[in-house]
Amino acid sequence: MTVQNYIHVIAGLFILISLALGTWVHQYWYFFTAFVGVNLFQYGFTNFCPLGIILKLFGIPESCSRF
């Protein structure tokens, strides 16, 4: 998996977890859902993602070189 794949998987997981927490724990968890959404929105325009930087530091490849 590449950095971009991990970003999508982790962002989706964060959204699902924060929606569950907002439903069952406290409605302020929906702000975390909004934060993830805004971060994905700005990533689409700027191609800058703090999670991507962290994943690269852990050695996750940026691109897949299968072929």
Image (cartoon, helix red, strand yellow):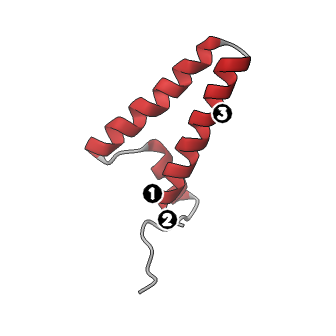
Q: Can you tell which of label 2 and label 3 is closer to the viewer?
A: 3
Q: Nearer the viewer, residue 53 or 34?
A: 34
- Kindly identify the amino acid type of the residue bearing the numbered disc 3: Ile
Residue neighbourhood size for the residue with mark 1, other residues' Cα within 10 Å, grouped as few (<14), some (14–19), many (≥20): some
User: Whole-Å distance between the Cαs marked 1 and 2?
Assistant: 5 Å
Labels 3 and 1 touching (C-beta < 8 A): no
Q: Residue at x 55, y 43 (%)?
A: 12
Residue 4, image quadrant: bottom left
User: Whole-Å distance between the Cαs marked 3 and 1?
Assistant: 20 Å
Residue 43, image quadrant: top left
Q: Nearer the viewer, residue 8 or 58?
A: 8
- Kindly identify the amino acid type of the residue bearing the numbered disc 1: Gln
Which quadrant would the C terminus be assigned to in this image?
bottom left
Residue neighbourhood size for the residue with mark 2, other residues' Cα within 10 Å, grouped as few (<14), some (14–19), many (≥20): some
Residue 13, image quadrant: top right
Residue neighbourhood size for the residue with mark 3, other residues' Cα within 10 Å, grouped as few (<14), some (14–19), many (≥20): some
Residue with the mark numbered 2: 2
Asked if residue 59 is positioned above or below residue 17 in the image, the reply reads below
